[in-house]
Image: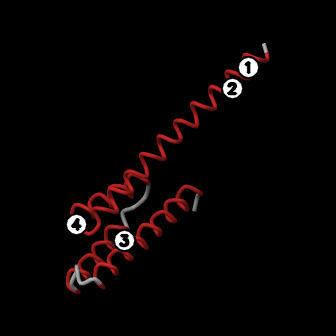
Amino acid sequence: MDQNSAVIDEKKKNLINKVTGILIDEMSKKNVNQDLGQEIATYVLNQSKNIKDDKSLNDFLKQLAEKYSIFKLHYVNSSLENQIKATDEEKITNIKEQLSKLANFQAS
């Protein structure tokens, strides 16, 4: 198993734990009955087998949110987190480039 698939496996495990937590919480609040809970659990187990990379992980979460409304908030939050992370990484890269230019300018 290479490092990338280990990372994806960890992300998949974390996502399934989160989804399971949401499902159990919603069932305990009586927002989801036992039949629907079983349907969702079966869907999650079957569909999670297709997660092989970040794109399939995001696709799974999107489909889950579209199919079962209890996951919509988690999907929106996850999408926002990913956008913020990408923006932060872009800012860090820009700052590093500016620092590098400044260091090279001072060295000349």
Q: In the rendered structure, which disc, 4 or 2, sits on the residue that comes first in sequence?
A: 4
State how far apart marks 4 and 2 are (Cα).
47 Å
Which residue type carries mark 4? Ser
Q: Earlier in the sequence, mark 3 or mark 2?
A: 3
* As drawn, 50 above or below 96: below
Tell which circle, 4 or 1, labels the residue nearer the N-terminal end.
4
Which disc, if any, is residue 19?
A: 3
Q: Quadrant of residue 49?
A: bottom left
Q: Tell me how far mark 4 sits from mark 3, CA to CA.
A: 12 Å
The residue drawn where x is 36% and y is 67% is 48
- Which of the 4 image quarters holds residue 108? top right
Q: CA distance from mark 2 to mark 1?
A: 6 Å
- Please provide percent x and percent y for residue 69: 22, 66
Q: Amino acid at mark 3?
A: Val
Side of 27 relative to 108 (left or right): left
Q: Is residue 88 above or below residue 103?
A: below
Per the image, label 1 sits on a secondary structure element best described as helix
Q: Residue furthest right?
A: 107
Q: Kindly indicate whether the residue at mark 2 contacts the one at mark 3 (C-beta within 8 angstroms).
A: no
Camera-nearest residue between 63 and 94? 94
Kind of residue indicated by mark 2: Ser
Residue displayed at 68% across by 26% down = 100
Q: Which residue position is annotated with label 2? A: 100
Q: Is residue 64 above or below residue 22?
A: above
Q: Is residue 69 left or right of residue 83?
A: left
Residue drawn where x is 47% and y is 43% of the image = 86
Cα distance in 3D space between marks 1 and 3: 49 Å
Cβ–Cβ under 8 Å for marks 2 and 1: yes
Query: Which badge, 1 or 3, comes first in the chain's sequence?
Result: 3
- Name the mark on residue 69: 4
Which kind of residue does numbered mark 1 sit on? Asn
